[in-house]
Image (cartoon, helix red, strand yellow):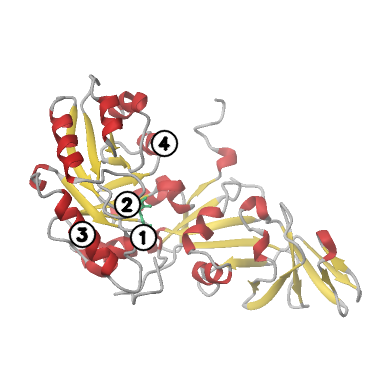
Amino acid sequence: MFYRDTWVEVDLDRIRHNVTNIKRHSGFEHLFAVVKANAYGHGDLQVARAALDAGADMLSVAFLDEALHLRRAIKDVPILVMGPIRPADLAVAAEQDIHVTAHDLQWLEAVLGYSGKAVNLHLKIDTGMHRIGLTDAASVARACAMIDSNPCLLRTGLFTHFATADAATRDGYDSQVRRLEALTAGIDLAEFRYVHLSNSAALLRFGRQSMANAGRLGISMYGLPPSHEFELPFELQQAFSLHSRITQIKTLDPGSAVSYGATFVAGERIRVGVMPIGYADGWLRYHQGRQVEINGALYPIVGRICMDQCMVQIDDRVHLGDQVDLINDSLTVEAAARDLDTIGYEIVCSISDRVPRVYKQGGRVVGERNERFRPDVEGE
Ligand SMILES: *Cc1c(COP(=O)(O)O)cnc(C)c1O
């Protein structure tokens, strides 16, 4: 149910296609579907279900809130929070069977007295990203000993994260793998049920590492390339598209300005269409001047993008109510990212939850998600 003419379409068949191919190509026994940030703006539950259906067997997110949201609907699948949680929240995670990241000794000190339902911990090793994680072999050994000293803490996983798996050369990747070997030389990796190193770029490029049995699949599951520095081993299919409709058409005389700041002035008599999408939807002001597609032809966005609306210069082939494609198979997420000097991740994550998501499968609409009308929050 939604009451505006702007929506995102997510093609779940494409997510399945991407997961199936990456799983086969990478050769891992286990695959985490990374569905943080509402599945990179696509919708966490819907993407999680499609990914699990296609061969992923675990989920991962950045924050405990995100994991708890998934857990309300998805019961029997491991969900890992890859970022640090507050020590005080460990019992909440344990109760809901959420796997938690143990990222440093201070954090482990703080949870060492925990008693309650046993909680699955994944040791995070910093091998060169210099974000979170244990940084030396003595700390890794000490962390293992601390976990083993408390029967309510389970040593379930071990992981690291690559900083440059998407770079032109593989040197950074290789040095992080060697660093992981060095930092874990004193412990038995076979004692961990899950050892996972790879993000999308590493999964696509390097396949399985001998010490790992799992990978974490994010951006490429959505069909977006992690980088242009390397050739994809097979075609990824972009699942995300963004659409709106023309809500008013007017003809402007030469000299007429469009939108705030009068940054666009008609040089001749022109037709302008209005669309109900703006920067509060994540269609940022930087998109001014970008082309959109209407009935197969391209037209430019003119004038400043407003909070809720923006204008497009059209011709007489465009009519009131016509569909406008802002992102589709030819106006790709990647092209938008390149134009804005950013990455595809940021484009899809930016489309806000004010925009309803529509899910397609087998060419048919199979579901909808509108955060303004969520049955699970209504009445709360
Ligand atoms: C976000 C994230 C991923 C997924 O990375 P992609 O490049 O999207 O595949 C994997 N691991 C960690 C720790 C992450 O934060």
- Residue drawn 63% across and 56% down? 6
Asked whether the residues under the numbered discs 1 and 4 touch, taking CB atoms below 8 Å apart as contact, a structural biologist would say: no
**Helix, strand or loop status at disc 3:** helix
Q: CA distance from mark 2 to mark 1?
A: 8 Å
Q: CA distance from mark 2 to mark 3?
A: 22 Å
> Dot 3 corresponds to which residue?
177
Q: CA distance from mark 1 to mark 4?
A: 20 Å
Ligand 1 quadrant in view: bottom left
> Dot 2 corresponds to which residue?
33
* Mark sitting earlier along the chain (2/3): 2
* Mark sitting earlier along the chain (3/4): 4
Q: 314 or 137, which lies in front?
A: 137
Question: Is ligand 1 closer than 8 angstroms to the Cβ of mark 3?
Answer: no
Mark linked to residue 221: 1
Asked if one can make out residue 55 in the rendered structure from this viewpoint, the answer is no
The residue type indicated by label 4 comes to His
Q: CA distance from mark 3 to mark 1?
A: 23 Å
Question: Is ligand 1 closer than 8 angstroms to the Cβ of mark 1?
Answer: yes
- Residue drawn 75% across and 62% down? 304
Asked whether the residues under the numbered discs 4 and 2 touch, taking CB atoms below 8 Å apart as contact, a structural biologist would say: no
Image location (x, y in percent) of residue 300: 70, 73
Looking at the image, is 149 positioned above or below residue 17?
above
> Dot 4 corresponds to which residue?
69
Question: Is ligand 1 closer than 8 angstroms to the Cβ of mark 2?
Answer: no
Mark linked to residue 42: none
Q: CA distance from mark 4 to mark 2?
A: 15 Å
Q: 326 or 40, which lies in front?
A: 40
Q: Nearer the viewer, mark 2 or mark 3?
A: 3
Q: Quadrant of the N terminus?
A: top right
Q: 207 or 22, which lies in front?
A: 207
The residue type indicated by label 2 comes to Ala
